[in-house]
Amino acid sequence: MPIEPQWLIIGGVAALVGAIALVARGVERKRREAYEQHCLIRGFKFEPERPEGERRFRDFFEPFNQGHSRRWSYTISGQLHGAAFTAFEYRWVTGGGKSSHTHHIGGLVWEADDAVFPQFSLTPEGWFSRLGQVFGMQDIDFDDAPEFSKAYRLKGPNEAGIRALFTPEMRQFFAVTLGQHVAAGGRFLFWWVDGRLPNAEQLDEWLELGDQVHRRFFKR
């Protein structure tokens, strides 16, 4: 009995999907192996997954409270310039079905027992946040730092504490180092980028970029 054309098409599509999934698994395996080798050479610790690793930070970091299907995956921890850090890759999903969207961030978190940060979030200013200000969305601006205030949205419940933390020197740093994402609360400081962690070959440079921000908040 001849095979109907539609079944040939369905079979071909299924084979293609399977091949794509196989290639993706291979790429991801090589990515993980590269991280493991990178960490072995530098004395860092690598974890392929840290289940519910975000739980202890939820009071201070907004992305950890968003969406569903949350997953804290690749984790790299160690010391850079004498300061302990944890790098992580995190994913969550918003919406459902055909309207679902998967979000990824790659971030760094530092912790210090003697730090007492006011809770805040600093993210690049966009048209959506500017529109939101018309409807009362919080954005802490500084009259003496128009470049900083134009470039970033700064928010948090303790406005006085946040203003004291963001000194003229710090505002100048962020005004000339655009596109930063920073959040803090208590003894934790976060820095992150949209998307996944960089490849192992780019990881050292990425860690140094994060450390530039870290040094502004943790004086050495």
Image: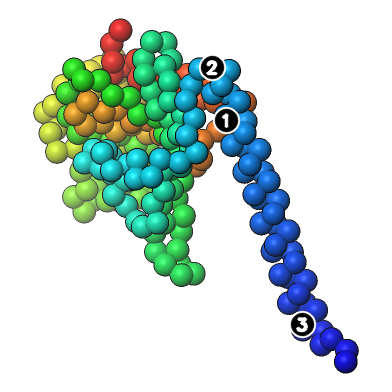
Tell whether 132 sits left or right of 83.
left
Mark 2 element type: helix
Q: Is residue 52 at all visible to an observer of this figure?
A: yes
Disc 1 to disc 2, how far (Cα)?
A: 11 Å
Q: Is residue 69 above or below residue 52?
A: below
Label number found at residue 7: 3
The amino acid marked with disc number 1 is: Tyr
Q: Residue at x 39, y 27 (%)?
A: 86
* Labels in figure, total: 3
Q: Quadrant of the C terminus?
A: top left
- First in sequence, mark 3 or 2: give its number: 3
What residue does disc 2 label? 42
Q: CA distance from mark 3 to mark 1?
A: 42 Å
Residue sitting nearer the eye, 57 or 168? 57
Position of residue 63 measured from the top left corner of the image (x, y, whole percent): 33, 45
Is residue 203 shown above or below 71?
A: above
The residue at the point 28 percent across, 11 percent down is 219
**Residue visible at 73% across and 59% down?**
19
